[in-house]
Amino acid sequence: MGIIGTVKFAATFAFALPVALYGVNRLVAGHTTGWAFVAIALLMLVAERYITTLFDLPERAAEEAAEAVADDDET
């Protein structure tokens, strides 16, 4: 994961954290619906990391092009 991927994950984490905290507060208050909010927050993080969207395609294409052009062999 590069710098852009790390920034994307941090932004997603910033949105998922309040959802997870709300779910924990609901659980502490005795409501079982808190588990749903915790699950939604986890799904947000997992989806950002493992699902490829249209916005991710140019980034992946650029990474593959850079790998094809760059020569890592030091002979």
Image (cartoon, grey):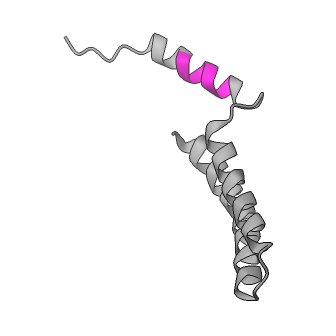
Does the magenta portion include 61? Answer: yes
For the record, the magenta segment spans: 58-64
Judge whether residue 29 is colored magenta: no
Residue extending farthest to the left is 75
Residue 26 picture quarter:
bottom right
Side (left or right) of 51 relative to 63: right
Residue sticking out furthest to the bottom: 29
Q: Main secondary structure of the magenta part?
A: helix
Q: Name the residue located 70 percent from the left edge and 24 percent from the top edge.
A: 57
Residue, x 76% and y 89% (percent of image)? 29
Q: Quadrant of the C terminus?
A: top left
Looking at the picture, does residue 43 appear above or below residue 4? Answer: below
Q: Residue at x 72, y 81 (%)?
A: 27
Q: Nearer the viewer, residue 17 or 59?
A: 17
Q: Is 75 positioned to the left or the right of 70 in the image?
A: left
User: Where does residue 41 sit, x and y in percent of width and height?
Assistant: 71, 60
Where residue 52 appears, as percent x and y from the top left, is: 69, 31
Picture coordinates of residue 23 (x, y %)?
74, 74
Relative to 14, is 66 on the left or the right?
Answer: left
